[in-house]
Image (cartoon, grey):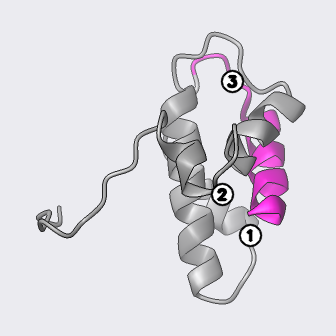
Amino acid sequence: MKDLRPTDVVTTIEGLPATVGTELHPMQQAWLDHDVAQCGYCQPGQIMAAVALVTEVAAQGRHITDADLDGIRTICRCGTYVRIRAAIRSGAARM
């Protein structure tokens, strides 16, 4: 794990909208649009992992692939993986 420096920024799920200056971050909106949440247990982790992945992939100048999505290892006990993947693709398109 990387050590944090005083200049590093930590963003929480609550602070995610502030990173884009809107009421909801595009990934959070995608979660609503695709009706992903059931119990809500994994949602913050899924969303934060998705945003980090999309940001990293975009920095490489490419688009999200199925292999990228397979790398997200946050477990959803409700099994809404199909909707999660659709929401990540949708949110990525808006980021």
Would you say 6 lies left or right of 52 here?
left
SS category of the residue bearing label 3 = loop
In percent of the image, x 62 and y 56: which residue is there? Answer: 70
Q: Amino acid at mark 2?
A: Leu
Residue 55 position, x and y percent, is 57, 69
Magenta span: helix, strand or loop, mainly? Answer: helix
Image quarter of the C terminus? bottom right
Q: CA distance from mark 3 to mark 1?
A: 20 Å
Q: Amino acid at mark 3?
A: Gly
Q: Amino acid at mark 1?
A: Thr
Q: Which mark is residue 69?
A: 2
Q: CA distance from mark 3 to mark 2?
A: 15 Å
In percent of the image, x 63 and y 10: which residue is there? Answer: 39
Residue 5 position, x and y percent, is 12, 68
Residue 49 position, x and y percent, is 51, 50
Q: CA distance from mark 1 to mark 2?
A: 6 Å
In percent of the image, x 81 and y 35: which residue is there? Answer: 83
Q: Are marks 1 and 2 in contact (CB under 8 Å)?
A: yes
Instruction: Mark 3 or mark 2: name the one nearer the start of the chain.
Output: 2
Residue most extreme to the top: 39
Magenta segment boundaries in residue numbering: 77-95
Instruction: Mark 3 or mark 1: name the one nearer the start of the chain.
Output: 1
Q: Which mark is residue 79?
A: 3
Q: Which residue is mark 1?
A: 65
